[in-house]
Amino acid sequence: IAGITQAPTSQILAAGRRMTLRCTQDMRHNAMYWYRQDLGLGLRLIHYSNTAGTTGKGEVPDGYSVSRANTDDFPLTLASAVPSQTSVYFCASSIDPYNEQFFGPGTRLTVL
Amino acid sequence: ILNVEQSPQSLHVQEGDSTNFTCSFPSSNFYALHWYRWETAKSPEALFVMTLNGDEKKKGRISATLNTKEGYSYLYIKGSQPEDSATYLCALGSGGSYIPTFGRGTSLIVHP
């Protein structure tokens, strides 16, 4: 793979179900991020990781968790999905927190 | 949460027009300002990373300036083309975590 990938591309999920969105990068970037895109609100940061083994909360972390066991992978988990989590989710990475971010193609999630 | 403001929210111009828009941010504790271009149904892509007061960056017909003392950055597009139609995001990095905060973007539509 080249760059940053996300899976699945899209998903329809029943409320209350658990869901993990996957994100993988092969650029050996230290920093990774999860955003959600909502109409009129732009991109909002959910969680981030400055380096493998560390994570931090962004602007809208409630209902989401992340882990960073290695450099390449940064999964986002919804423990019990709710309809307000319907959104497009973007994963991004950067060589370090100071530099430009590279974005994945996005995951469109619908919670019914 | 930092207050990053972009104006105007949307802009319609004719092909060949030059245009510019603004990103305003709190000037304290500044470390970087990023500009991204986001085409519909795609992912954001970085245009510029700006760190120094007075920075000017250029890529083809697009250029940007930075004033960290007064807290603003301008993005200019010379001779707009329909393919310039996109949302332009700015992101501010400041503070101890250095995680950029995104503005809500300026939506540019260039009519042929």
Image: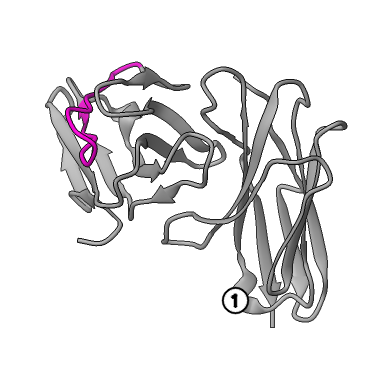
Question: Under tag 1, what secondary structure?
Answer: helix
Q: Residue at x 74, y 31 (%)?
A: B25
Residue A102 lies left or right of residue B58; in this view the side is: left
Q: Quadrant of residue A76?
A: top left
Majority SS type along the magenta span: loop
- In reply to whether residue A37 is colored magenta, the answer given is no
Residue A7 lies left or right of residue B18; in this view the side is: left
Where does the N terminus of chain A fall, quadrant-wise?
Answer: bottom left
Q: Residue at x 17, y 28 (%)?
A: A69
- Foreground residue, A27 or B8? A27
Q: Chain of mark 1?
A: B
Residue A67 lies left or right of residue B61; in this view the side is: left
Q: Picture coordinates of residue A79 (x, y %)? A: 17, 20
Q: Residue at x 70, y 77 (%)?
A: B111
Query: Which residue, given by chain and number where applicable, does mark 1 sit on?
Result: B83
* Range covered by the magenta-colored residues: A62-77
The answer to whether residue B31 is seen in the rendering is: yes
Judge whether B73 appears above or below B31 on screen: below
Q: Picture coordinates of residue A71 (x, y %)? A: 24, 37
The answer to whether residue A112 is seen in the rendering is: no
Farthest-out residue, left: A17
> What residue type is disc 1 on?
Glu
Judge whether B42 appears above or below A88 on screen: below
Residue A92 lies left or right of residue B19; in this view the side is: left
Q: Residue at x 78, y 26 (%)?
A: B27
Q: Picture coordinates of residue A27 (x, y %)? A: 30, 51
